[in-house]
Amino acid sequence: MAKSIEAYVDNRGHLHMTPKSAVIGDIAAALGRVGDEGGLTEGVARLILEKRAEIEQAFADLDTMDEREPVRIDHSEADTVEVFDLEDRRKKG
């Protein structure tokens, strides 16, 4: 006799046995191809899901910082402050 099962469908219409798998499929689709032949996409999507709390906190921090005025540094303090611009480093790398 046939049995019914519980399954999940991602945004592309692919069937998954767990909600986690369906969400990983959706994240992978949003990322597109990562690496040669897209081989890294599922792993990156899985890592994003595993690090969800940290990633959501980073976005919350960004949203909070976007709402604030930048910190002003007195010229006398400028020599003691080290500034990291990761976006700039990425472009040079």
Image (cartoon, rainbow, N blue to C red):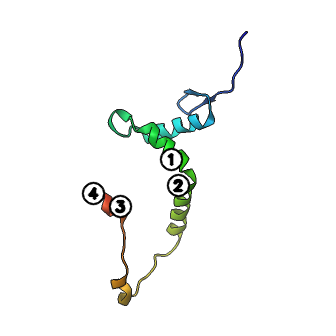
Q: Which mark is residue 93?
A: 4
Q: Residue furthest bottom?
A: 76
The earlier-in-sequence mark between 2 and 3 is 2
Residue behind mark 1: 48
Query: Could you say whether the residue bearing mark 3 is in a helix, strand or loop?
Result: helix
Q: Which of label 2 and label 3 is nearer to you? A: 2
Q: Which of label 3 and label 1 is nearer to you? A: 1
| Residues at marks 4 and 1, CA–CA distance in whole angstroms | 23 Å
Residue behind mark 3: 87
The earlier-in-sequence mark between 4 and 2 is 2
Q: Residue at x 48, y 42 (%)?
A: 45
Query: Could you say whether the residue bearing mark 2 is in a helix, strand or loop?
Result: helix
Q: Whole-percent x and y of residue 84? A: 36, 69
| Residues at marks 2 and 1, CA–CA distance in whole angstroms | 7 Å
| Residues at marks 3 and 1, CA–CA distance in whole angstroms | 20 Å
| Residues at marks 4 and 2, CA–CA distance in whole angstroms | 23 Å
| Residue type indicated by callout 3 | Glu
| Residue type indicated by callout 1 | Ile
Query: In the rendered image of this protein, does residue 82 appear above or below residue 2?
Result: below
Question: What is the crowding at mark 1: few (fewer than 14 residues within 10 Å), some, or many (at least 20)?
Answer: some
